Image (cartoon, rainbow, N blue to C red):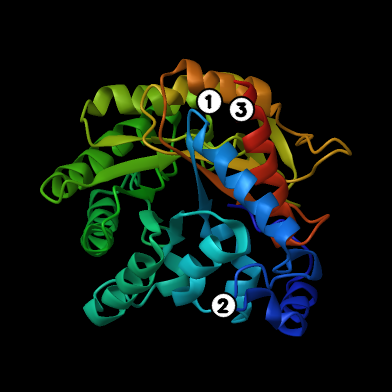
Amino acid sequence: MKRSRREFLNTSTQYVIAGTLFSPLWGACSEESSNSEKDLSKESNEMEISKDLFFKISLAQWSLNKAFFAGAIDHLDFARIAKNEYGIEAVEYVNQFFKDKANDKEYLNEMNKRAGDLGVKQLLIMVDGEGGLAELDDIARKTAVENHYKWVEAAKHLGCHSIRVNAYGVGSSEEVSAAAVQGLGQLATFAKDYDLNVIVENHGGYSSNGQWLSNVMAQIGMENCGTLPDFGNFCIESDTNGNCVEEYDRYRGVEELMKYAKAVSAKSHDFDANGNEIHSDYMRILKIVKDAGYTGYVGIEYEGSEMLPEDGIRATKALLEKVGATL
């Protein structure tokens, strides 16, 4: 989840000024989203298209990360925003936006209530900042594993099916792979008692090599340890300016990771005049997803900088619906 957006202050200011974007009323996010019969009919038609897809659509909280970091949106409002602003009835949380609440049952109960009242499913928690599960040092890796326990318990409390983690470590490919098998295996063993999955995203470094990560999964060999293929996170190495200098083939990578997939992330950045994402061929990549027999949720994760996040989310949703209906 790279923070490749507009400057933080500029984006934050936009959200504060446009605070009415996230009013509790359906369609109050823009003038175009009025309560007119025409707009309601359009929204209804969009929902009908979604029902005919081979997959279901969810919304990753990271798509609105600038607004959450700026405090323009409260974490507890995310389920409402997903449902009322975008017509999406399933959400994927990011632990950074409620990082001190993993053990706060009252807060988690409030999340359950708000999502439940809206009929919104809470699918998973993306966990960052708890240490590398593929650290070569045994003590550091053990600490990282145990740091994730509270998120397993929180995810169970919220009715999620998974926590998304990072297979991060520093060393040779073989060394980090062996450490990842140990760390992920230990965490998955703990999560098994909670009927929770531990899933790994291609998220930089070795994990963005589809063959490497799929081999790690094969070695672990546990039903509740899998992957979260992301359409765009296949940069293996970046320079000091953050520019990718080595990238794994995304189509090959998604194909390799789909064998173990328990969730899928539809990464998007920029769109052409026809509404197609210019970095990923959605027709090609979603066919790979379908051919793998996947029928679960595909989560929208917009990270572009050329349009506002709310527009990027809608553009990604429209593209998923268009391509999904064709497939």
Tag 1 secondary structure? helix
Tag 3 secondary structure? helix
Q: Which residue is mark 1?
A: 254
Disc 3/disc 2 C-alpha distance (Å): 30 Å
Tag 2 secondary structure? loop
The 10 Å Cα crowd at callout 1, few under 14, some 14 to 19, many 20 or more, is many
| Rendered location of residue 269, percent (x, y) | 73, 46
- Report the residue at 39% width, 31% height from top: 261
* Labels 3, 1: front one: 3
- Report the residue at 54% width, 61% height from top: 82
Q: Which residue is mark 3?
A: 325
Hey, which residue is sitting farthest right in the picture? 273
Res. 120 image quadrant:
bottom left
Q: Which residue is mark 2?
A: 24
Relative height, residue 160 to residue 216 (above, below): below
Task: Specify which label sits upstream in the sequence, 3 or 1.
Answer: 1
Q: Which mark is residue 105?
A: none
Quadrant in which the C terminus appears? top right
Labelled pair 3, 1 in contact (Cβ < 8 Å): no
| Rendered location of residue 96, percent (x, y) | 46, 68
Tag 3: residue type?
Ala
Tag 1: residue type?
Val
Hey, which residue is sitting farthest front in the picture? 37
Labelled pair 3, 2 in contact (Cβ < 8 Å): no
Hey, which residue is sitting farthest top in the picture? 291
Tag 2: residue type?
Pro
Relative height, residue 104 to residue 246 (above, below): below
Q: Nearer the viewer, residue 155 or 234?
A: 155
| Rendered location of residue 314, percent (x, y) | 69, 52
The 10 Å Cα crowd at callout 2, few under 14, some 14 to 19, many 20 or more, is some
Left/right of residue 312 with respect to residue 80 in the rendered view: right
